[in-house]
């Protein structure tokens, strides 16, 4: 019998991580070899465990799962990344695939579908939730520059222009320009609406 496909799970909710481990371990050809709860722990664990698959969530403390896809693949070139998330946002899908993820699935699917997706990824396929793929095609590309996104992200806590300027080492007038550009590009009435739109589409 072939060796089972080994899996490292990155999921911050302990109950979800435990449930995934239990359910995937019931499959004869799959074996969960470890789990982490923080994004900044993934690379070290992957180097140590050398898994075939890194199964990761997006919203993780420490570092976003999206930010860790490329570093994981660089650290362990033989593994594949499968994203499993609650946040089915087209922008997240685009970023995940651009970073090298082989699959992007939503958590509300049965575990049998996840197991099947892992097998398909091991066979060299790319697996994407079909409804999300359709939504991504209609969402278009992210219109924000990196700096516009930084400024919009920094405004999330209701920070003042002066506060954002200090945080990002920019002039207040530059911050206003970036915010104005972002609001205009997103067709929003104000920065709160722009922030909501950008988040909903996975561009932040």
Image (cartoon, rainbow, N blue to C red):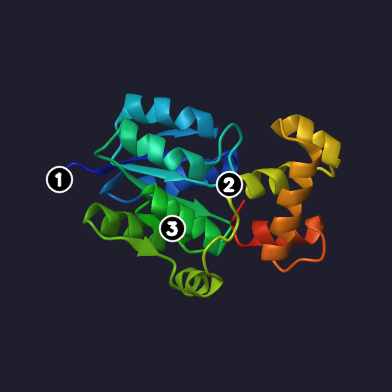
Residue 124's tag is: none
Q: On the image, numbered disc 1 is attached to which residue?
A: 2
- Under tag 1, what secondary structure? loop
**Which is more toward the observer, 184 or 19?**
184
Crowdedness of circle 2 by 10 Å Cα count: few (<14), some, many (20+)? few
Left or right, 159 with respect to 83, comes to: right
Is residue 106 shown above or below 175? Answer: below
Q: On the image, numbered disc 3 is attached to which residue?
A: 104
Earlier sequence position, callout 2 versus callout 3: 3
- Quarter residue 63 falls in: top right
Q: What percent of the width, then of the height, locates residue 35?
A: 46, 34
Q: Residue at x 72, y 69 (%)?
A: 187
C-alpha gap between disc 3 and disc 1: 26 Å
Left or right, 7 with respect to 199, comes to: left
- Under tag 3, what secondary structure? strand
- Under tag 2, what secondary structure? helix
Q: Residue at x 57, y 62 (%)?
A: 89
Q: What percent of the width, then of the height, locates residue 110?
A: 47, 63
Q: What percent of the width, then of the height, locates residue 105?
A: 46, 60
Earlier sequence position, callout 3 versus callout 1: 1
- Quarter residue 45 falls in: top left
Q: Which circle, 3 or 1, is nearer the viewer?
A: 3
Q: Which circle, 2 or 1, is nearer the viewer?
A: 2
Q: On the image, numbered disc 2 is attached to which residue?
A: 146
Q: What percent of the width, then of the height, locates residue 39?
A: 52, 34
The answer to whether residue 195 of the structure is visible from this angle is no
Left or right, 186 with respect to 138, comes to: right
Q: Which residue is drawn at 74% across and 31% down?
A: 167
Crowdedness of circle 1 by 10 Å Cα count: few (<14), some, many (20+)? few
C-alpha gap between disc 2 and disc 1: 46 Å
The answer to whether residue 20 of the structure is visible from this angle is yes
Most extreme residue toward the left is 1
């Amino acid at each position: 019998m072939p060796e089972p496909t080994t899996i490292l799970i990155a999921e911050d909710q302990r109950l979800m991580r435990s449930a995934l481990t239990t359910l995937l371990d019931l499959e004869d050809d799959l074996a969960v070899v470890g789990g982490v709860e923080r994004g900044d722990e993934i690379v070290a664990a992957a180097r140590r465990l050398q898994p075939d698959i890194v199964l990761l969530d997006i919203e993780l403390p420490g570092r976003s799962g999206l930010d860790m896809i490329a570093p994981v693949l660089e650290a362990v070139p033989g593994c594949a990344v499968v994203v499993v998330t609650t946040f089915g946002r087209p922008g997240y899908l685009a970023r995940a695939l651009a970073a090298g993820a082989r699959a992007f699935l939503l958590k509300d699917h049965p575990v049998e579908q996840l197991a099947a997706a892992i097998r398909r990824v091991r066979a060299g396929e790319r697996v994407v939730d079909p409804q999300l793929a359709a939504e991504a095609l209609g969402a278009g590309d992210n219109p924000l520059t990196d700096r516009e996104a930084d400024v919009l992200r920094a405004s999330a806590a209701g920070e003042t222009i002066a506060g954002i300027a200090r945080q990002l080492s920019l002039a207040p007038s530059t911050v206003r320009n970036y915010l104005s550009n972002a609001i205009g590009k997103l067709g929003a009435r104000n920065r709160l609406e722009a922030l909501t739109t950008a988040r909903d589409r996975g561009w932040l």
